[in-house]
Image: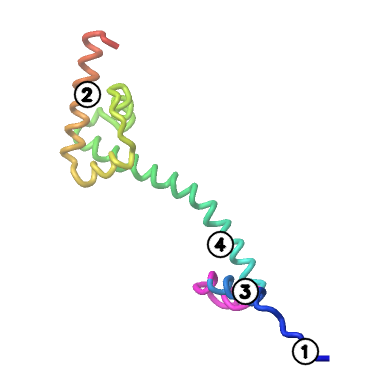
């Protein structure tokens, strides 16, 4: 009886996994079983850390905005700025505000001063 040659499908699957694990160290990049385990672990970690990355970036943006706002006025803070922005119906997200705070502080100061004037004016007149 002649020898049966195996197909290429399993080999193609394993080479795909090996390509995924090229940057892993030691047996994690050479042995098939450990490659599959590390692939599952890596994909799980990537999925989990996407959420924490969003949280960390939001925290960074808030810190940057607060630091720049508190430089100019001691009594004014990030939370008051965001509150006044919502009251003034000026919807800028935190990412854009943080970029403005880093690249062009004067622009952020102008925005905050205009919002303070507008909201302060409405409070004193009694429109709200």
Q: How far is the residue under mark 3 from the one under mark 1?
A: 23 Å
Do tag 4 and tag 2 residues touch (Cβ < 8 Å)?
A: no
x 61%, y 71%: residue? 35
- Residue with the mark numbered 2: 116
Query: Tag count in the figure?
Result: 4
Q: Residue 101 shows which numbered tag?
A: none
Residue at 25% in and 28% down? 75
Q: Earlier in the sequence, mark 4 or mark 1?
A: 1
Q: Position of residue 102 (x, y in %)?
A: 23, 46
As measured in the structure, the alpha-carbon distance from the residue carrying label 4 to the one carrying label 1 is: 39 Å
Q: In the rendered structure, which disc, 4 or 3, sits on the residue that comes first in sequence?
A: 3
Q: Is residue 115 above or below residue 128?
A: below
**As drawn, 97 above or below 30:** above
Q: Which span of residues is magenta-colored?
A: 20-32
Q: Secondary structure at mark 1?
A: loop
| Among the two numbered marks 2 and 1 on one chain, the one whose residue lies closer to the N terminus | 1
Q: Nearer the viewer, residue 117 or 74?
A: 117
Q: Earlier in the sequence, mark 3 or mark 1?
A: 1
**Where does residue 84 sit, x and y in percent of width and height?**
29, 24
Q: Which mark is first along the chain, 2 or 3?
A: 3
State the separation of the CA atoms marked 4 and 3. Answer: 17 Å
For disc 4, the neighbor class at 10 Å (few under 14, some 14 to 19, many from 20) is few
SS assignment at label 2: helix
Q: CA distance from mark 4 to mark 2?
A: 48 Å
Q: Which mark is residue 42?
A: 4
Q: Which residue is mark 3?
A: 14
Place of residue 128 in the rendered image (x, y in percent of width and height, measured from the top left): 30, 11
**SS label for mark 3:** helix
Q: CA distance from mark 3 to mark 2?
A: 62 Å
Q: Nearer the viewer, mark 4 or mark 1?
A: 1
Q: Which residue is mark 1?
A: 3
């Amino acid at each position: 009886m002649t020898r049966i040659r195996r197909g290429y499908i399993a080999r193609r699957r394993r080479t795909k996994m090996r390509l995924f694990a090229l940057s892993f160290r030691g047996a994690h990049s050479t042995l098939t079983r450990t490659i599959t385990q590390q692939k599952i672990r890596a994909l799980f970690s990537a999925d989990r850390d996407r959420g924490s990355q969003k949280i960390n970036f939001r925290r960074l943006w808030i810190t940057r905005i607060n630091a720049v706002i508190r430089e100019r006025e001691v009594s004014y803070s990030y939370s008051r700025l965001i509150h006044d922005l919502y009251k003034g119906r000026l919807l800028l997200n935190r990412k854009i505000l943080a970029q403005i705070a880093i690249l062009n502080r004067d622009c952020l100061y102008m925005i905050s001063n205009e919002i303070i004037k507008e909201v302060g004016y409405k409070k004193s007149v009694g429109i709200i």
